[in-house]
Image (cartoon, grey):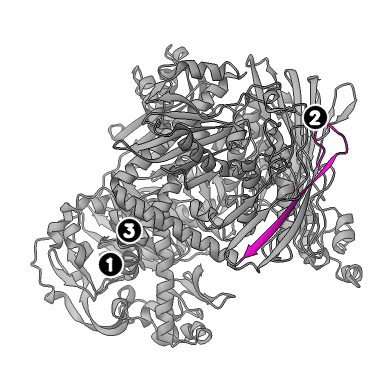
Amino acid sequence: MRLRVGIDVGGTFTDFLVVDERGEARVFKTLSTPDDPSRGLLHGLGEIAESYGLTVQELAGAVEVMVHGTTVTTNAVLTRRGAKTGLLTTRGVRDALEMRRGIREEQYNNRYANVEPLVPRYLRLATGGRLDHDGKELEPLSEAGVLEAAESLGNEGVEAVAICFMNAFANPAHERRAEALLKEKLGGAYLSVSSTLLPAIRFYDRVSTTVLNAYVGPALRRYIDALVEKLSGIRFAGVLRIMQSNGGVVAPEIVRERAAMTLLSGPAAGPRAGTFYAGIHGLSDCITVDMGGTSFDAALLRGGQPLFVTEGEVDRLRLALPMLDITTIGAGGGSIGWIDKGGLLRMGPQSAGAQPGPACYGRGGQEPTCTDADVLLGYLPPDEFAGGRIRLDPSAARRAIERVAGPLRMTVEEAAVGMARVIDANMANGVRAVSVRRGFDPREFPLVVAGGAGPQHCCAICSELEIPLFLVPRQSSIFCAAGMLMSDLIHDDVRSMPARLDRLRDGRLEAVLREMSESARATLRAERVADEDVVLQPSLDMRYVKQYHEVNVPFSPGSSEVAERFHREHDRLYGYDLADQKTPIEVINVRLRSIGRVNKPSFPELALAGSDPASARKGERRAWVPERRAFEEVPTYDADRLSHGMRLSGPALVDQANTTLFLSAGYGLVCDRYGNFVGFRRDRAESLPASVAELCR
Amino acid sequence: MTVDPILASVMQRAFKSITDEMSVSMMRTTRSPILCEAKDFVTGLYDEKGNMLEQTENLPILSFSLGPVCKHLLEYFGDEIHPGDVIFHNDVFSFGNQNNDVAAFKPIFLAERLIGWAATKGHMADIGGAVKGGYNPAATEVFQEALRIPAVKVYERGRLRKDVWDLIFANIRLDIVKEDMRAEIGACTIGERRLQALVEKIGLERFEAHKQHLCAATERMMRQEIRSIPNGRYHGEGKVFFDGKHPGSEFTIRVAVAVEDEDITFDYTGTDQQTDGFVNGTYTSSASATILTFLQMVNPDIPHNQGMLRPLRIVIPEGTILNASYPKATTFGNHLCPPNADAIIRALAGAIPDRVGAGWNHLLCALTTGHNPRKAEDYVDICFMGLKGGSGAVRGVDGYDHIGMIDASGGLLDQDYEMFEQQTPHQLLRHEYLTDSAGAGEWRGGLGVETEILLGGERTQLVTFGDGDVKPAFGLFGGRDGTLNFIELRKPDGTVYRTTSKDIVGGVPAGTRYVQEAGGGGGYGDPKRRPAEKVAREVRDGILSRAAAEKLYGVALWPGTFEVDELGTAELRRGS
C-alpha cells in the first residue's frame, strides 16, 4: 500500500485525509493539542493505522508523502503569544516598526487605536554603523553596540531577535556580522535577519516582515523539530512537506528558518481545494468558506485562480511576502457567546478551542459556544458526533446557554436561535469582505463549503446573501487537508538588478536567470522532485524611469516581447502607457517562481443510483427550521449511503462521520458523481449556471 | 422600480473599490514622492450632475472641492462634453482648493450618454509661480503663486490638444509634473472603464434607481447622527499665528455651529478679514476642513456620497481669512484646517463631550528643493516623516501617535526611509518618538516625533509653512497641552538657525543638520486618574520621563526599576 496524507492542524481539530494509490480516500479527525500540536498529530496517525489494520510503524512506512498545514504561527500572532522578541536595528530608526509610516487606516475614526507592536519599545535596541543607499559603508558596525544590545536582550530573556539595518538590502555585511555576534552571545535564540529573509528595498516592509518572522520563529522551529523527531521515531521515511501562505508546499528544513512563510499556512490550501470541487461542475468562479472550531476563512476565486497579493497584512502587521488573498474572522464552532455592555448578544472572537472545548463535549467547558447551540437546535446528533467517539451532552449545552439566556430574558431555545443568527451574520460579513467589498456580487459565486461547522450554517449564509448555489464536498470537514494533497511545491526567488532594459540586452538577464534556475532545480531536487516535474516561471519587475513602483511581467529568456507586454500591462492596470513617448523602461527585480508538480490524487466515480434517497434514510430528529420559525421533526439521512443522483428536499439533515449538513426549507440537494453534495435554492433552480442546472433540475 | 437593498450595497462597495483602484493606480505610477510615497492625492467618482458617488480620500482636505469643480465644469462646457475629453483644473477662484492641487476630470459615457465622471487630484511638485514648489510667503496675489488652470480641455474626443498641453507645461519647472498628470489621466481611465462595466451589467435604469436609494439611505444615516447632538447654537474660536509678513500677527477664526434637529450649520460670520499675504483659505479648502472635522464626530461607517453632505450647511463670508476674494494669494489655505478644526472642537466639546477629542498637533513642515548631483537632477521633497505629530485624545482612547495634521487624519504617510535616501541626496539620522511630547491626561495625547536629517546635494533651499510653534495642541477636561513644533538648521560652521513658520531659507550648505520636532496632541481628562501601570510602562519604554510621571501623573516609581511605588503614588495623587 502506498499512501498520501494531508494533515490540517486547526485550533480545535486536526484533520486527516488519507488517499491510497487507487484514489480511495479515508477521513480522520482528532482533537488538536495546542500545547504541542505534534502530539495530536501522532495520535491521529495511530488511529489511521488501526483503521487500516497496521501498526503505526507499518503505516509510517507506507506513507510516501505527508503534507502538513499548521496554524502554529498564525495563532501565535493572533493571540499575541509569540516569542518574547527583541529588535536590533540602526541608531535612530527603532520606532519605524511601531509607527507603521504613520497610517491610521480609519481616518475619520478617533477611537481607532494603533496596533500593539510585536516588540515593545524597551526591547527595540539600536547600534552604531551605517551603510549608504548603495550599501557602501559610511560608518563601521559598532560591535560594542551589538554586544551591549546582546547583553540587554539576554538579561531580558528574549527567545528571538530580529536584525534589520538601514540599507541592508544592498549589502548584508553588517547584518551578517551582528548575526554572528548574537549567535555567540545568545546561543539558542531564534535569529531573523532582514537581508536573508527579504533582500528588498523599503525599510518598513523589511523590518516588519523580519520581526514577524522572529516572533513566530521559535514556535514553528520547536514544532517542526518535535514533529520530525516523532515521525522518525515511528520510522517515517517518506517526504514531509509544509504548506506555505503562497499556496505552495515546501520542505520543513527550509521553512524552519522562514517561519513567516507559514502565517497563512492553514487556510492556504482551501482555495486550491475549491478550484478542484468547483471544477468538477465546470465552475471556475466560486467563494470558498471554511468554518472550523476557531476561525472562518473566506477566499474568492476567479477563472479557477485564487486572488493573490505580493504583500499584505496579518492582523494589521505588514508582511511583504507573497500570499493568497484570504479573509479570516473569529467565528467557529467553538466561538463563545456573551453579552456586551449594551446588553446585546455577541459571538466570538474568543473560542473555547480544543481545551476545554464546547460545554457539550463534557471536558469542563462552561461557556456557551456555537456548537452548543447547534446541539440544542438539533443540527448535531448527540450520540453519533465524530463517528460516535465524542458524545455530546445536550444538558451541558443547555446549562451553558442559560448563561446568556438569563440576561436576555429568553428561553434557552430562543437564545440558541439567537446565537446561530448572530454567528451567521458574522460569517455573511466575512463573505461580503471578499466579494462585495472588492466589487463582486456574491450571488454570482457558488459557495464551496468546508470545515466541521460549515455545513450546519451554509444555508443560513446563502439565505443572508441570496446565494442560490452551494457545494459541500464529501470530505468537507477536511477540506484544507484535501487541498494540501493537490498543492504543488512553490518557491519564489527574487534578485534586485536595477538597470535600463535596453542596456540589459547583453545576456546579463539570461545569466542571472540561469543561476536562479540552477538553484531552484537543486532545491526541488532536494525535495525529491524529478526534473521533468519542474516548471519555471521567470518574470521581471519593470517600471518607466523615475516611477517608484513596478509591474510584474512574465519573461522568456531571449524574447523581445517583454517591453511590449509591459506597456500593455501598464495600460490594463493603470489606464495608460508611455510607448508613444518612448519613455525608457527600467528593470528592478528578476523573479523566478519554481513549481515542483506533484501527483494529485484522483477520486473514483460512483455509479448512478437513482434519485430516491429512501435507502439512506435513518429517521428523524427535532431541529429548528429558521424559515418556519419552529422546531420540527426533520428527516435524517446517512451521508455514507447517499449515492450519485440521489436528491433531497429541505428541511433535512445529512449526518456525516464528522459533521452534519443542515438543508433548510426551500433548498434542494443532489449527490454528484464523486459523492459531493450540490445544494441549491429550489425557487432559483432555473437560473443556475448551465453546467449544474441539469443536475439540479 | 422595486429597490433591491443588496444591489444598493453592492454598488456602494463597487464604487469604493473603483476609487480605491484609481488610488492604487496613482500611487504606483506617479514619480513625485509627494504622491507615490506620501499619497497626497484623492480619487473620486461623480454622477452626470456632479454629485459625489464615492471618494478615496487619502488627504481629506483636498477631497470636498472635486464635487463643486465637477458641477462648475458641467456648467462651463455645457453641451461641449464628449467621450474622450480630459479636463485639467486647479483654479482657486472657481472652486479649486489650492493651486498645487491639480485635478484631472474625465467624463464617462455609455452609448453616447453621460453617466458620470472620474476625477483625480494630487499635489504637484511644482506649479510655476515665483517659488519652486509653489509655497511663496511673499506673494500677495495668485499671479505670484502659480499658473492658474481654469477648466481647460487637454484632450478633446480622445485627441491630445498639443498646443494647450505645451502651454501648461511650459510654465512648470519640473518634467515629472507632466508625468504625474499623465498618471492622473490614467487613473481616471481606470475609473471610466470600471464604471462603464458596472453600469453595463446593472442596466442604466436600475443603476439610477439604486444610486438614488443609496444616497437617500446615506442621508438618513447622517441625519440620525445630527439628531443625536442636542439642539443649540455653539460657538468656538481658533487662532492663526503669523501671516508670513508681519511677525507676531494673529488672526481669529470664529464659528457658530447651529444644530436644529436633523440639520447642522457651520457659520463663520465674524471670522477675521483676509490677510495681504498667502495665509488665506478658499471656500472649498475651508469647507473641506469643516467637513473632515465633523466627520470625526459621527459614525465613521457612513458612506461618502452626496447624501452624506446634504444635511450640512457651511457659511463662510467672502473676504475673510477662510474665503479670500480674487485675486488674493491663498497657497497656505489648506493649512488653515488645524485652527479651523480647533474652533469646531471647542464649539462642540460641551455638547458632545464623548465624541469630541482634545486638540491635534498643527502642521509645521519644510519643502526642500535643490539639485541632486548623484542623479544629475533637480528634486522637490516635502519632509512628511518630520511633520507628523500626535492627535488629541478622546474619552476612553489615547491620541494616535505620529499621525500628522488633522487635514490628513493619518492618510498621509512617511516616506520609506530607504526610498528617501535613494531619491534625495540626504541621509536620515533619526526619526523617533519624542519623549514627553504627549499632552498628559487620563487619556494622553498622541506622541510627536523628532527628526534629524543630514542635508546633501547642491543649491538647497527650504520653504517652511504651518504653525504650532506658538501655541501647542490643547487639552480638554483637565487634560494637558501637547508640545510645540520647531524646525532648526544646524550648519557645519556651528551656527544654528531656527526658522519661522513661513520662511524661505536659501543657500543651505551641504552638511547642515535639519532638526525638527513635531509636537504631541492634547490630553483628555485628569492625568492623575490614569492607571499607574500604564504610566510605568511608558516610562520603561522611554516615551515618558520619570520626572513627568511624578509631576504630571502623580506616579512614583521605585528608583532603578519600573515598578510603581504604590504608597508614594498615593501620596502624590492625594488631594488632586
Q: Which residue: 45% across, 63% down?
A: A295
Element type where label 2 sits in the image: strand
Question: In the picture shown, does residue B310 fall above or below A677?
Answer: above
**Residue A550 visible from this viewpoint:** no
Q: Which residue: 42% across, 14% down?
A: A507
The prevailing secondary structure element of the residues shown in magenta is: strand
Identify the magenta region. B241-260
The residue wearing badge 2 is B503
The residue wearing badge 3 is A479
Question: In the picture shown, does residue A226 fall above or below A174?
Answer: below
Q: Nearer the observer, disc 2 or disc 3?
A: 2
Determine crowd level at label 3: few under 14, some 14-19, many 20+ residues with C-alpha closer than 10 A. Answer: many
The amino acid pointed to by label 1 is: Ser
The amino acid pointed to by label 2 is: Asp
Q: Is residue A343 magenta?
A: no
Residue A51, numbered label: 1
Instruction: Name the residue nearer the viewer: A295 or A250.
Output: A295
Count of labels in the image: 3
Determine crowd level at label 1: few under 14, some 14-19, many 20+ residues with C-alpha closer than 10 A. Answer: few
Question: In the picture shown, does residue A671 fall above or below A77?
Answer: below
Q: Which residue: 69% across, 33% down?
A: B331
Q: Position of residue A283 (x, y in %)?
A: 23, 50
